[in-house]
Amino acid sequence: MDNREQRYGIAAAGWAEVEPNERRKGGFLCRCGRHGVACELMNAIVEDLNGKIRRGNPYVYELLSGLGRELYFPRGILTQSAEAKEQAYRFDATIGIATENGQPLYLPLIQETLSDYEPKELYPYAPAAGKPELRQAWREKMLRENPSLRDKSFSQPVVTSALTHGLSIVADMFAEAGDAVILPDKLWGNYNLIFSVRRGAGMKTFPFFSSEGLFNVRGLRETLLKQRTRKKAILLLNFPNNPTGYTPGEREAAGIVEAVREAAEAGINLVVVTDDAYFGLFYEDTLKESLFGRIAQIHPRVLAVKVDGATKEEYVWGFRVGFLTFSAGHPEVHRALENKAMGCIRGTVSSVTHPSQSFVLHALKSPAFRQEKEEKYLLLKERALEVKKILAADKFAEVWEPYPFNSGYFMCLRLKSVKAETLRRHLLQHYGVGVISLGDSDLRIAFSSVAKEDLAQLFELVYQGVKDLKQLRD
């Protein structure tokens, strides 16, 4: 069994890859003798999707991974069930759920805790791409909050099981072994697992901050242009950033967009992924919209992908509801990419939890939604500004330097004289304080999870921990 068979279980499933000159042109040929017409149909779906992408934007087709080219949403049970839902006026015996009295069967003791919702909003399987009403509501929210999107063509958002799942779909669709994933060196550690460990891509980092304490546009540009020989790269942008809590301003944003355009003009095909997990939590003079809107349609070689969700934006971390949106400047390409994303969902989690989608949709439609969000935004903004006041004390400059921060949930300290992991353990063991160590010198502090009145004591304990370690060492 070769590597391809090991990765996708092809041999075990009774399939053999055919040579490009055979009748299926690089698809899969059933060798068990049982599948027949179904196998031909599967291949026809793939060829149709890939053909639409090639015709609409051939650079996007070149960006797809091997798995991405093979992905499709099968015309199987879910498609047939959807047709039956619309047309089967007498009996619908398609989908594997139980019904009673014309609605989904349920246990009353569970429904009692969810009495504001109809059973049909909770118990059936959700469509693979998500509830249509939720997808439309999120699209409208994106347009309202991102002025740069209003004259752009982009796909309908596909519902994912939060952002990690959305990023994983992007990795499956576009990342191959040896591909370069470009991102700043202040990054969320799970990116390595998603893109490198799972898909074999190489992580190419550049310093996050310039010498002026701004986003390092020059470093981004230079790292992008180094990919000219490969002619493909995946750029991953995360603002507000985890772990630093930094979002670029307008001038930096313009520089980022220009660097992407320059790389595309140099012949590099780019997937530009905006991880907007903390979108909207902009506290100071920063860009107030996603870079997705600025990057969409700037060049035919650039595929913009937005990964966002209710998880942190609407403070529903455990609901696991995210969204995946594409912009390649061509509606047919968008529909084909949606289909491939649906195929990835169907082949992994099948569909995203229905109750959570209903809860989020209910919130988005509520007249109180914007006011309640604003209240929580102001609470977090107060905490961020309080941290800035606390860190202005002269004594702290001796032991650490805060990285610039202006948004999100976090901020980072660059420790000057002790190791971050040593300090983390010391604070936990001796003061009952939990923080995150990143590398040798960086300490991440989530001010989002500490009350404003407790922040001064928190930083005082961190300071005391540094003094303890220095005293032990000296």
Image (cartoon, rainbow, N blue to C red):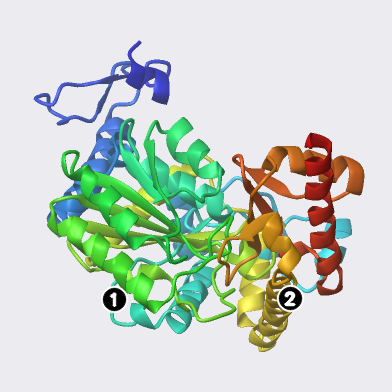
Task: Specify few, some or many for label 2: CA neighbours under 10 Å numbering under 14, 14-19, or 20 or more.
Answer: some
Query: Which residue corresponds to the image point at 23% horizontal and 44% vertical from the top-left?
Result: 226
Question: Which residue is the site of mark 2?
Answer: 386
Query: Which residue corresponds to the image point at 35% horizontal and 66% vertical from the top-left?
Result: 155
Check disc 1 and report its element: helix, strand or loop: loop
Query: Which residue corresponds to the image point at 64% horizontal and 85% vertical from the top-left?
Result: 370
Q: CA distance from mark 1 to mark 2?
A: 38 Å
Name the image quarter holding residue 42: top left
Query: Which residue corresponds to the image point at 27% horizontal and 44% vertical from the top-left?
Result: 64
Q: Position of residue 289 (x, y in %)?
A: 45, 76
Task: Indicate left or right for 417 with 259 as reference.
Answer: right
Quadrant housing the N terminus: top left
Q: Amino acid at mark 2?
A: Glu
Q: Position of residue 234 (x, y in %)?
A: 33, 48
Question: Which residue is the site of mark 1?
Answer: 152
Task: Specify few, some or many for label 1: CA neighbours under 10 Å numbering under 14, 14-19, or 20 or more.
Answer: some
Quadrant housing the C terminus: top right
Query: Can you tell which of label 1 and label 2 is closer to the viewer?
Result: 2
Task: Indicate left or right for 335 with 193 as reference.
Answer: left
Task: Indicate left or right for 359 with 255 as reference.
Answer: right
Name the image quarter holding residue 304: bottom left
Q: Earlier in the sequence, mark 1 or mark 2?
A: 1
Q: Height in image: 134 above or below 100?
A: below
Check disc 2 and report its element: helix, strand or loop: helix
Q: Nearer the viewer, residue 436 or 25?
A: 436
Q: Height in image: 133 above or below 268?
A: below
Q: Nearer the viewer, residue 98 or 384?
A: 384
Q: Position of residue 318 (x, y in %)?
A: 71, 56
Q: Amino acid at mark 1?
A: Lys
